[in-house]
Image (spheres, rainbow, N blue to C red):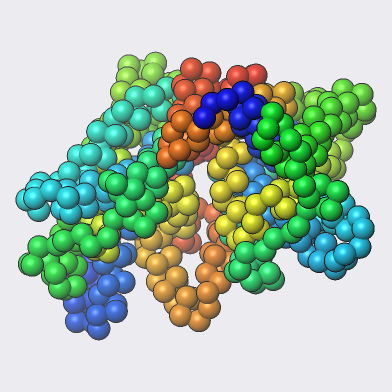
Amino acid sequence: MRDRRVLALAGFAVLLAVPLVLPQFYLLLATEIVIMGLFALAFNLLLGYAGMVSFGHAAFYGLGAYATGLLLKKTGAPFAAAFLAAPVMAAVAALLFGLLCIRLTRIYFSMLTLAFSQIVWAIAHKWYSLTGGDNGLVGIPVPESLSTPRAFYLFATACVLLATWVLWRLVNAPFGRTLLAIRENGERAEFVGIHVKRVQLAAFVISGGLSGLAGGLFALFSRGAFPDYAFWTKSAEVLLMTLLGGPYVFLGPALGAAILIVLNSVVTSFTEYWPVVLGVILLLLIYVFPGGVTRLFRRSSAPSAVAAESP
Amino acid sequence: MLEPGFLVVQCLNGLTQAMFLFLIASGLTLIFGVLGVLNFAHGSLYMLGAYLSYTISSLFVGAPGAFWVALLLGSVGVALAGGLMEALFLRPVYRREELDQLLVTYALVLIISDAVKFIWGPDNRSISRPAVLAGSVDIGGRDFPTYNLLVLALGPLVALGLWLLLTHTQFGRLIRAAANDREMVGVVGVDVSRLFTGVFVLGAWLGGLGGGLAAPVGAIYPGMDVEVIAESFIVVVVGGMGSLSGTLLGALIIGQLNAFGILFFPRFALVFVYVLMVVVLVTRPWGLLGKPLAR
């Protein structure tokens, strides 16, 4: 068992090293996959583990992007501070939004997350003097040492691996088990003495903070931050990645992100009609292989209750 | 700047917008109330309504009544498309979790948006108003488009029609019963799947009618679908998901908030409506006139 795990880790390390020897196009693609993979993993802490369907995670991703971008572009903040501001800012916002959101359940919870994220989007979209409005915040300066695609890929991968490790530890700790218990039956969890709302809020903040980290990384990667990062379609995108990969396997969402980004890159090289392809994939996902691609390979520990039942 | 005539016109502008919002959101709320499905593709139906009206009216250019024929045929076309959508795509997933139903409608958003781009191209289109309504009327020394008077009249008319339908017809009674308890309606021998299709067709028709009516006012462009769906969600959530009178109230509030928000805070009117959505969800999650979800 232990050997297999070491082998898997080694294989994973090789997979991450491969883009370094490939042409630059693939390196950029891999960077995008790594960053969006983190976003999907962070999102899935809520969807897969806590059973909370957020329609507004773009808010945290966008806030992270703008926090890092604005600090680097408009102030002389040191890089480390500006970069760390992404998860911190997003986590603070997640705490504020979360305090109100977790009081609601099901569709009302989803709608409130959506409303908050649309507020973030509307502000980013309209506050021209600060955010550049719909033109976006462009020309974010990046330190010399990260300016090559190769260096940035290594940097992003290191950050994402660290964050993934934290998430992995969390979901396998009592905290993760508690989340599953709440997802399966919140009422019963309450009976055995779990402070359900507090645990849900903690998950919301962690998930939001790490989504912000992904946003900050992407702002550095694209040297820009745009209102679209916080628009509801971005929330739909991460939801799609997560479901495509499979929310009930830890790395499933990251796999979903990889599949979607690679497919997008292939399809858009032939045709501009990517959305219709995405729509058809989504329909296949629902009718043909529910549970995501990871379900095709193994019978996973899917929940007995529906995911949308709690919080 | 704030003379009475101007305020009245601004208020009427808000009312006009409210009537548009009501037409679109009433279909959304009806479908949610009965089928329990949050239809992301409702904005796409609205967009289809606008494009179909455009194509049909361009077939009869210059003919009197072209606009009305286009409005009628366009919205009926959207209703048929909605019926197909429901029967082909939604029917298989009613027994699945809510998220799956939502994803089906989102997939349809993506597919329809590309279909529209494919058929009509990426450029903006526009329809001219019917000749009788092309001018404007004088209200307190200000111009107010005559066309908006039509919208102001049609909104309450549709609301009244829906109310009569719901309270005075067999179909309406079934709709209200199904909104209350779907299973029981099935148990007493009603063909629920036909009822669902009927409701979806009606909801789609309302969306298409909204699109056709809005077409001469704003531009017709790919992307109008995702914009309008966000606005309709606000209206429906504020008024109460599943409540028709709530949707009317929500539309009236959002319309005025937009009209006067733009006046005083041109940049952040958009923020206000979302803040209102947050306030309502936090204090009364089921909306101003809605009922708490029982299931």
**In this orientation, which residue lies closer to the viewer: B151 or A43?**
B151
From what the image shows, is residue A140 above or below residue B165? Answer: below
A75 relative to A251 in the view: left or right: left
Q: Residue at x 60, y 69 (%)?
A: B122
Residue B254 in view here: no
From what the image shows, is residue A45 above or below residue A182? Answer: below
Q: Residue at x 56, y 48 (%)?
A: B227
Q: Position of residue A90 (x, y in %)?
A: 26, 40
A201 relative to A298 in the view: left or right: left
Q: Position of residue A106 (x, y in %)?
A: 51, 31
Which part of the image, by quadrant, shows the C terminus of chain B? top right
A146 relative to A245 in the view: left or right: left
Residue A87 in view here: yes
Q: Residue at x 55, y 42 (%)?
A: B230
Q: Position of residue A225 (x, y in %)?
A: 30, 55
Quarter of the rendering containing residue B153: top right
Label count reads 0
**In this orientation, which residue lies closer to the viewer: B6 or B231?**
B6
Q: Residue at x 42, y 22 (%)?
A: A103
Q: Position of residue B20 (x, y in %)?
A: 70, 39
